[in-house]
Image: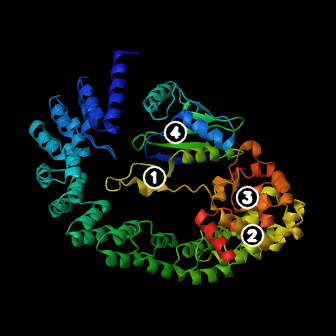
């Protein structure tokens, strides 16, 4: 079983959890929850805290996935936050299993991050020293494109529109 | 929590500020940090370059680092990752006895010929001689020494790649018997390209070995055409012919030969999906073979044979959301008829030309009413959203079957504008009104 993922980069700083929740609600009409081993209110300042707790838990158990910080929403399967230290602690990775029945939650969460200033980041490791222009690795966000425009408030979508989010790999 | 943990966390907190902030706050963080009994590891964080970030306290950090009795490895780490490379190298030579392996570590970063001389005088191991060849100007000296020691094929390759004693190494390699893999890398990466290629051919390379040149993962482009030409002189399987087409090497000839093998849709799936030079031909071929749903979606998505694929798809049982996808990619009449029948929408009462002009007039007079990012947002709508808003029956269809289906039935010739940017939509509407 593989994973599906999306890497983000924020030019200023990582968003606050409350800001993410607010935008997610605006887009989907649904309530977003964030779980982490450490109590946090902001993705950026929590980085050290979470890593500290995560490493501690890793020593205690090999079940890393369960301990990873994650987003949850209604009956949808959880979306995990990962690898959010690099580069310069302004990047992170959202991931979900490819066995998900509906990609609505995952896609809506991605749209949320893009709406609040995140960029799709195509690089997954440190660029070389001579290749430091991060703008070269950021993709533009075009909200008029079908993949984003079809994400409406969950309760305002008919069954046909909801079915469009069926995972093609499933 | 122990005191150490608190101190470590405090240090981490201050490092965060040091790396992210500027000016006074950063200076204050540095002042506080210095009060925390920093060890060499801590100071390495200040001195070493972190991608995208460099603190202005490298000089001060380095001076402090020297007073903390750093170990040899601490200093080597600074040599490897810091702008203080030269200073650290000097410090290292003045304060420590260096083993051969230390010298190699340093040479790999500093490419220092003087250290390479030191290493050469110490009867270095073969791999240490390889490091000297790769990283310093003492290539020939190291190569000469290596040639005295019965080098293996890998070591001879290093001599060929890095020194001027390449011909001597080449002769030795021939005596030892090079593998095709040895020859492949000599062709791809050294000056002896032609010599090695001739010898490679004499060793009867397999199709797979020739295909490595065609695939050209090293992106040198060397002998790519020649290898493809040679492959075409042989009996090739379908996968190999598909690969030649994918790599756009003699694609016409490869395609003709592929057709003679009567490929099935699965054999051609990849050719279509990768949008190769033969995508449309492969799609056309598949369409004649009673393709399955998966193949037809592949053709619809990636080839120019959308209408033909759509015609076959509508003969199959499709979910409504699949029909929505289909009508957006091919608004052909039969697709529209199937869709309108499924959702019980009478298209005969829709005058598409009249409707688009009505929308164009409205939007061009009040461009603020166009919102391409949402189907509907208060009083603003996208093009498809406006079509639905102006058509009562379509509003019912939208409620039941969604915006995409409703709008596609009203404006089947303008579905490409449903997800276009604002400028494109406005520009096409202007054209309609002219």
Q: Which mark is residue B356?
A: 2
Left or right: residue B244 versus residue B60 is: right
Q: CA distance from mark 4 to mark 2?
A: 47 Å
Q: CA distance from mark 2 to mark 1?
A: 43 Å
* Residue placed under numbered mark 4 in the picture: A82
* Residue placed under numbered mark 1 in the picture: A123
For the question of whether residue B322 can be seen, the reply is no
**Colour basis:** rainbow
- Asked if badge 4 and badge 2 are on a common chain, one would say no
Residue drawn 64% across and 45% down?
A108
Tell me if residue B106 comes above or below residue B414 in the rendering. Answer: above
Q: CA distance from mark 1 to mark 3?
A: 36 Å
- Asked if badge 1 and badge 3 are on a common chain, one would say no
Q: CA distance from mark 1 to mark 4?
A: 15 Å
* Residue placed under numbered mark 3 in the picture: B385
Chain of the residue under the numbered disc 2 shown in the image:
B
Chain of the residue under the numbered disc 4 shown in the image:
A
The mark nearer the N terminus, 1 or 4, is 4
Disc 4 element: strand
Disc 1 element: loop
Q: Quadrant of residue B285?
A: bottom right
- Asked if badge 4 and badge 3 are on a common chain, one would say no
Disc 3 element: helix
Residue drawn 60% across and 68% down?
B424
Name the residue furthest front. B365
Specify the quadrant that holds the C terminus of chain B. Answer: bottom right
Question: Could you say which is closer to the camera, residue B124 or residue A145?
Answer: A145
Question: Could you say which is closer to the camera, residue A120 or residue B350?
Answer: B350
Specify the quadrant that holds the N terminus of chain B. Answer: top left
For the question of whether residue A95 can be seen, the reply is yes
Q: CA distance from mark 2 to mark 3?
A: 12 Å
């Amino acid at each position: 079983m593989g994973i599906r993922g999306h890497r983000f980069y924020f030019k200023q700083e990582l968003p606050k959890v409350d800001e993410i929740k607010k935008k997610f609600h605006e887009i989907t009409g649904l309530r977003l929850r964030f779980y982490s081993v450490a109590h946090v209110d902001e993705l950026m300042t929590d980085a050290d805290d979470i890593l500290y707790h995560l490493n501690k838990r890793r020593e205690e158990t090999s079940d890393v996935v369960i301990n990873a910080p994650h987003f949850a929403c209604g009956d949808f399967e959880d979306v995990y936050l990962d690898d959010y230290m690099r580069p310069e602690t302004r990047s992170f990775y959202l991931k979900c299993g490819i066995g998900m029945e509906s990609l609505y939650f995952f896609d809506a969460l991605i749209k949320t991050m893009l709406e609040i200033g995140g960029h799709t980041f195509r690089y997954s490791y440190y660029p070389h020293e001579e290749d430091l222009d991060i703008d070269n690795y950021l993709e533009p966000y075009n909200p008029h494109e079908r993949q984003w425009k079809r994400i409406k408030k969950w309760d305002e979508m008919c069954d046909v529109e909801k079915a469009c989010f069926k995972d093609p790999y499933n | 929590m122990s005191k150490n943990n608190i101190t470590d966390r405090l240090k981490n907190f201050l490092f965060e500020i040091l790396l992210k902030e500027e000016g006074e706050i950063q200076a204050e963080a540095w002042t506080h940090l210095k009060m925390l009994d920093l060890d060499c590891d801590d100071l390495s964080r200040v001195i070493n370059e972190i991608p995208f970030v460099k603190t202005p306290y490298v000089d001060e950090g380095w001076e402090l680092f020297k007073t903390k009795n750093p170990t040899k490895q601490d200093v080597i780490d600074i040599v490897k990752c810091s702008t203080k490379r030269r200073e650290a190298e000097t410090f290292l030579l003045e304060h420590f006895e260096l083993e051969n392996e230390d010298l190699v570590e340093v040479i790999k970063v500093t490419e220092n010929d003087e250290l390479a001389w030191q290493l050469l005088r110490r009867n270095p191991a073969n791999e240490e001689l390889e490091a000297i060849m790769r990283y310093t100007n003492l290539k020939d000296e190291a190569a000469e020494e290596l040639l005295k020691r019965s080098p293996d094929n890998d070591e001879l390759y290093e001599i060929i790649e890095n020194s001027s004693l390449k011909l001597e190494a080449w002769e030795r390699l021939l005596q030892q018997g090079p593998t095709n893999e040895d020859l492949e890398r000599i062709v791809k990466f050294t000056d002896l390209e032609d010599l090695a290629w001739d010898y490679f051919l004499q060793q009867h390379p397999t199709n797979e070995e020739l295909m490595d040149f065609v695939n050209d993962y090293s992106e040198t482009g060397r002998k790519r055409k020649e290898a493809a030409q040679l492959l075409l002189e042989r009996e090739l399987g379908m996968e190999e012919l598909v690969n030649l087409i994918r790599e756009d090497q003699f694609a016409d000839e490869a395609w003709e030969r592929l057709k003679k093998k009567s490929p099935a849709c699965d054999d051609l799936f990849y050719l279509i999906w990768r949008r190769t030079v033969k995508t449309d031909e492969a799609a056309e071929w598949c369409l004649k073979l009673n393709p399955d749903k998966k193949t037809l979606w592949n053709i619809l998505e990636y080839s120019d044979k959308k209408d033909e694929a759509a015609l076959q798809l509508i003969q199959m049982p499709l979910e409504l959301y699949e029909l929505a996808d289909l009508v957006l990619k091919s608004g052909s009449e039969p697709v529209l008829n199937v869709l309108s029948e499924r959702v019980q929408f009478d298209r005969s009462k829709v005058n598409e030309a009249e409707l688009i002009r009505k929308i164009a007039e409205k939007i061009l007079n009040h461009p603020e009413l166009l919102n391409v990012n949402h189907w509907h947002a208060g009083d603003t709508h996208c093009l498809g959203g406006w079509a639905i808003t102006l058509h009562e029956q379509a509003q019912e269809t939208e409620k039941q079957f969604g915006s995409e289906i409703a709008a596609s039935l009203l404006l089947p010739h303008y579905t490409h504008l449903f997800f276009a940017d604002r400028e494109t939509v406005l520009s096409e509407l202007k054209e309609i009104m002219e």
